[in-house]
Image (cartoon, helix red, strand yellow):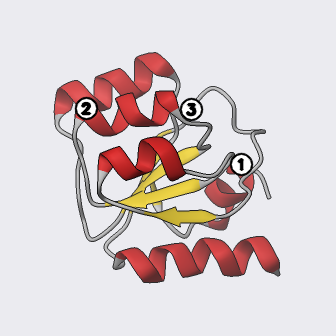
Amino acid sequence: MKIKDLIDANLFTVLNQGKDVEQEITKPFCCDLLSICMSKTPKGAAWVTVMGNINTLAVLSLTDASCIILAENAVFDEPALEKAKSEGITVFRTELPVFESALAVYNLRND
């Protein structure tokens, strides 16, 4: 499954469509502790978190994650959203809890 497939599925609101929507999503990854994310995020993961700040984008740039899904109505502030746009990072938002968001990605990926 690619990022464009997740966009097309309309499971989540797209806050920013990144520059590489052909990037493969390998699995969902749930974590809110940024130091853990830096070392444990699997390559190609759709990172599900409630951490809606610019540090989240910095961590994503250090990993090989494919996109960010802000769960539980978490939001980026304006500087973070502008940074996501300038860096070409795909960011989604949903009211679903973290687990249910990850499960939705998992189910779509494995159908």
Is residue 64 something that shows in the picture?
yes
Instruction: Tell me how far mark 3 sits from mark 1, CA to CA.
Output: 10 Å
Q: Is residue 50 or residue 9 the one in the foreground? A: 50
What label does residue 4 carry, if any? 1
What residue is rendered at 59% in x and 65% in y? 28
Is residue 15 something that shows in the picture?
no
Element on which disc 1 rests: helix
In the rendered view, tell whether residue 93 sits above or below residue 68.
below
Q: Residues within 10 Å of mark 3 (few under 14, many from 20)?
A: many
Residue linked to disc 3: 18
Residue linked to disc 2: 54
Q: Residues within 10 Å of mark 2 (few under 14, many from 20)?
A: some
Q: Is residue 99 left or right of residue 95?
A: right
Q: Is residue 92 left or right of residue 51?
A: right
In the rendered view, tell whether residue 27 sits above or below residue 104.
above
Element on which disc 3 rests: loop
Q: Is residue 45 or residue 2 the one in the foreground? A: 45
